[in-house]
Every structure is written in C-alpha cells, then in structure tokens.
Image (cartoon, helix red, strand yellow):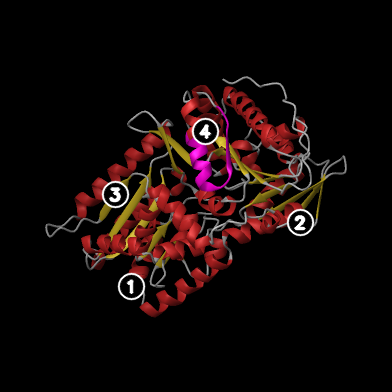
Amino acid sequence: MSKPCPPQPRSRPVAESRPRRLVIVSNRLPFVITPAADGSLVSRPGSGGLVTALLPVLRDRGGVWVGWPGLVDHEADLEAALASAAGKAGYRLAPVALSAEDQAGFYFGFSNQVLWPLFHDLQSLCNFDPAYWRSYCAVNHNYAQAVLAEARQDDFVWVHDYQLLLLGAELRRGGLTAPLGFFLHIPFPPLDIYLKLPWRFTLLRALLEYDLIGFQTLHDQRNFTQCVRALLPELRLTHRGSRARLPDGRQVRIGAFPIGIDAAAFQRQARSPTVLAAADALRAELPNRELILGVDRLDYTKGIPQRLEAFRTALHRHPELQERVTLIQVVVPSRDDIPQYRDLKTRIEQLVGEINGEFTRPGGWVPIHYVYRALDRLDLVAYYRAAHIALVTPLKDGMNLVAKEFCACSVDSDGVLILSEFAGAVAQLQHGALLVNPYDLEGTADAIHQACSMAAAERRKRMQLLRRAVSRQNVFRWVNGFLEAAIASDLDTFPLPDDYLPSAEAEHAFWDTELA
C-alpha cells in the first residue's frame, strides 16, 4: 500500500492576469491507456457518465484533469501517451500513481465493496474490512498530493464521486485555500442505511470541508442533510437544508444538480452518415422486428437479471410478441476482480441461454442478442438510433445517462423509453417515459407490451417531451448551475482559446481521431 507522503510545498499564487482554470479530480483520467501490440501505449476516451458529461465541458479550456491513468510500471511511455491525449483534448492530464495493492484496497475494496453497495441500499453486500478503510485514507492523501502540485489559488477544484470523499479534508490539511466543490454521481443513502458505516462521522466531516456539495436529486440531498442533522447536531442547517453553518462560522452550500449530456452532440452524431449506415445494417440483420435495447455496465445495481426475467415474462404473457421483438442486451465489462461481478456475469449468461433455448424458432428468430464488450461512441450511437425501445431498469441509479442519450439519439421521435422508478433520471423524464418497478416482473412485461403496441402519434408525443427535457437540462446547464452555486461564475469565467473550433467541428475532429 502507498504510504502517506509529507505535505508538499504549494506553488506561489500566480499573477491575476493568468486565466482561471477548472481542475477536475476523479478516480480515473478520462482516457484509457492501454499497451499496443508493439509495446507502446495508446489512449482512447474512457467510458461512463462522468467522462461523457465532462469531456465536452473541459475540452480546450486549458484546465487540468487529475486521476489514475490505469497503468503502473510504464512511466516513460505513459508520459508520452498522456501528452498525446492531452494535446487532442485541450487540457492537461495529471496522473496519480497507484500500485496494485492500492487498487485492491482503495478501489476494489473500500470504494466498491463498502461505499458502492451501501450507497445503493445493498448493505448486505458490504465488506467492512478495516484494511480497506486504511487504504482508502492513504490513497485519498496521495490524490491530494497530486492536486496540490497542480492547483493554484485562483483555480476552482471540482472533485467527483464516492472514491474521493476524503479529498477535500486532505486538501485543506495541505494548505489549499482555493474554492472546492464536490459532486456525488451515485445516490446518497438514507440515515438508517448510512448508520451501518463504521466511519460515518469521519466521512461526513470530510465532506463538509468542501465549499459546495452537489447531489443528483433532491432525494439524495435530503438524505445527506438528514444524516448531518442526526450525527453532527453541532452544525446548523439553514435555508431548507441548502446550507450548513459550521461552528467556526464557515458555510457549506448543499444542492441538487441533475447531471446532463451534450444532447446537441449526440443528435448530430445520430444524424451522421456513418451512424445511419451502421443503424440501417443492424435493422437489416433483424428485419420487421421491434428492437428493444438494454445498455449497461456489468453491475448488480443495473437490474439486468430482473430485466431478462421480465422480458421472458412478456413473451409468456403476450405471445403475440414472439417472433416480433428482439432484445439486444449490451453488457460492458466492469470490475472483473470482484467475485460478485463474476457471479453476476455467469447469471446473466445463464438467463440468456435459458430464454433463447425456450423461445428460439426454426425460422431464425432468436429473442435475445447478447453483446459482452465495450462499445465505442459511434457504435453506441448506432445502437441507440437502430432501437425502437430502450429498456432502462436499474434497481437504483444516481442518474442514468443511457436514458438521456437514447432520447437525444431518437431524432425521428419514434422511440419509447421504459424507465425504472428508481433511476435519478425519473425526476426529469417521468412525463414521457413508461415508468416501471424493476422488481415487478409482470408490470415491466406489460410495459414492454405497451411500448410495442403504442401508436405512432403517442410515441412521437412522448419522445418529443423527453427530447425537450434532455436538450434543455444539458451538461452545460449542469456545469453552469454548479459553478454559479459554488463561485458565482459560469463557464465563461474559464475562457476558450482564440483558435477554438466551433463545437460541432471540434467534436467531429476529436471523436474521428479517437474512434476511427
């Protein structure tokens, strides 16, 4: 395990003439660094909601992104690979070195066997190993050293997600006085579940070292303030829980900021000739079918087994769907080192085999097409464009950007979104989506039948509502809302260079370079 390093001297404040920068801090850098066949290292954009949201925001603004590059023991090659990726992205990449032991204790251990299940109301899956906690503390300290080496006092440091809950306290301990914001991308649990955490006081107090704490939904914000009231009664919550006044007089702002996507970029890509050709090819392989799409990272919170059982129930309850519908289930590999995830993969594959074995017909109809691999951006958009129905049914999710991406890519307004009541996105998309309880197999099955039977006019009306919501509450509105709450500023405070490409042109050049 990495040992905490002594605080490093911070650089002196720079002259005010230098532009203010965004310093983004997350567990991983937004680029995946992988070895090539010749032994060199190559980069490609990472996946996940955080990367999807922030890539278009930070691009070309000259800021800094701090995170783990995903590799060890490639120091020389790594520097060149990061420099190449940063040149294309238009901001600096600052790596944090982690050992295999760090990853085992900090990431696979405390982050994903304690915080992840606990914050998703699955405390029975937690492993409260004290060694995991010690690793989590040490690694958060190491991230702080990397940030202190990069940040200036006039920067805005924006920390992301559950892996770095302690980072604000470490940065303050290291002497950083720049404004700090924190955004939690996953749910925050209610008091009765949060109480199970042995280190509950330490984490709450560390979070309150940030100037602004952001959550996906009002429900998550209320859960947090409930925990603060119960566990830290010396603090005073004001303005309906939107501010916490500390004993030393400092105030911390608390708010809900639903994350969005770059909807315009998805719409442009969905209309591109490359995507149209790929979508037409997918539909040609499965002609005269209603294509139902599920896209999920391999995770027990996504409700994939329940979704497959609901699809099987739909075929039984509504036999007219047989040979008329095909479910395309894409599962993106994730956290293979955790036994629960390996068991989940086995369970999914067993269910797919059972359902296909039960319903496949000699004429060639196979009810489920199962894809287990990562998709690049253009392939993903092609799946969105080809599908008629999106089945987004997590057991619990902070937001779920797949739902929003599908709506943005439904440029003909002919798609239907079936959405779990327990996804954070339901607050914004409830008026156009068909809402389901993912534990209710028959209810979800009936929603699948309703979506397949829905008249074109109703599809169009519902999808237009969804597309307006996704376009209006986009990623730039999310960032501006967060910055306004944190430092009374917006993205214009972090200027683009004079030679900045217009959005569509820059995006085309970036994704073509990375994904061709």
Q: Quadrant of residue 477?
A: bottom right
Q: Is residue 93 rendered magenta in the image?
A: yes
Secondary structure found at label 4: helix
The amino acid type, in three-letter code, at marker 1 is Ser
Residue 54 percent location from the top left of the image: 56, 51
Question: In the displayed structure, does residue 446 sit left or right of residue 259?
Answer: left
Contact flag, marks 3 and 2 (Cβ < 8 Å): no
Look at the image and give the residue range highlighted in magenta.
81-97
State the image quarter where residue 493 is shown.
Answer: bottom right
475 left or right of 486 in image? left
Query: Where 156 sits versus 444, above or below?
Result: above
In whole angstroms, how far apart are the C-alphas of marks 3 and 2?
47 Å
Residue 436 makes an appearance in the image: no
Say if 431 sits above or below 139 in the image.
Answer: below
The tag earlier along the polypeptide, 4 or 2, is 4
Residue on which the image places disc 4: 113
Q: Earlier in the sequence, mark 3 or mark 2?
A: 3
Which residue bears the numbered disc 1? 453
Residue 488's tag is 2
Instruction: Please give the residue where the numbered disc 3 appears in the rendered image.
Output: 370
Three-letter residue code for mark 2: Ala
Q: Tell me what residue is drawn at x 58 percent, y 45 percent.
A: 91
Q: CA distance from mark 1 to mark 2?
A: 49 Å
